[in-house]
Amino acid sequence: MASALPMAPMKRTQSMNAMIDKKKKPLSPQSLAARAKMVEYVEAHGGSKPIHTILVANNGMAATKAMLSMREWAYDNLGDAKALTFVAMASGQDLDANAEFVRLADRVVEVPSGSNKNNYANVELIIDIAEREDVDAVWPGWGHASEYPELPDGLKARNIVFIGPDGGPMRALGDKIAASILAQTARVSSIPWSGDGITCDPKVVIETGAIPPDLFRKAMVTTAGECMAAAEKIGYPVMLKASEGGGGKGIRMSQNAEELKVNFVQVTNEVPGSPMFLMQLCSNARHLEVQIVGDKHGQAVALNGRDCSTQRRFQK
């Protein structure tokens, strides 16, 4: 097989080179006044650290919407849309496309092109840029590195704010079994499943980023025999799920014990090594999601909901 030819260096227009080479410019008197208002705003609302400079560790629509929304907030609350300074990461492709988020940013740092592992999903790179650019906070957006707990952990160690959840809760909620146990702990109603009634100490989860192993194990099904026993208790039809599955993988519906035996083998082979759990099938239901945003000060707000019942691979 012939090896791939190296990509030719991307040509930079004069305007793009100027964008990449932007340096910190002295703030205008108006922006300095707005920054002082930011400090007052944070103190008045019980905050702990004013945020003036933000690294946007994302691209495309996510980065564009974030900067526009935060500038609108700064204008409405501080009287100056430029009270916040945005540093954008931009790959060669985004720079050559003259992407909207690149034009909106105050400073731009060029990052390697190619797969997002080279740029927007590269945790070490994001942390390095955040340090070099002396930012107060990092906004990860969605996708890319936004759900890697190593990112908030690494930033916290460097006293940089991660605009999102801490690493501990992120680790716990990233697993379906752990998330279900946490939901029960918060007294959220759940349909019958193999972990019925199991709760934990939320403080332990925050500190360790995990459900205690003994509790986690109680919610699992590890053998065909355990599946049969749990199904008899829950009642058919049931769904067998791999906690590390997703996108339609590692999930099977069983109407009876014979089907469950076959599906146990299939799920085990489809997501090797993943913990599994059993849940009662909820028929004729709709899958609704509500986005809830909370902060460490105990404040929370529910945003718009959406109907996710129909998906490409019918994974719901």
Image: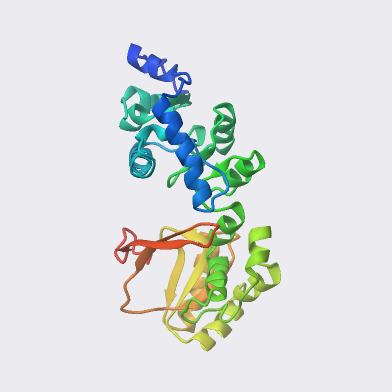
Look at the picture and state if 9 lies above or below 264.
Answer: above
Quadrant hosting residue 248 = bottom left
Q: Is residue 265 visible?
A: yes
Q: Residue 42, image x and y in percent?
A: 50, 47
Q: Residue 244, image x and y in percent?
A: 53, 60
Look at the picture and state if 47 lies above or below 177.
Answer: above
At 41% from the left edge and 62% from the top edge, which residue is drawn? 301
At 49% from the left edge and 43% from the top edge, which residue is drawn? 40
Q: Residue 178, image x and y in percent?
A: 58, 66
Q: Nearer the viewer, residue 141 or 224?
A: 141
Q: Is residue 200 left or right of residue 106?
A: right
- How many dots with numbers? 0
Q: Is residue 147 visible?
A: no
Q: Residue 202, image x and y in percent?
A: 62, 67
Q: Nearer the viewer, residue 30 or 206?
A: 30
Look at the picture and state if 146 lies above or below 18.
Answer: below
Q: Nearer the viewer, residue 271 or 262?
A: 271
Look at the picture and state if 17 lies above or below 313.
Answer: above
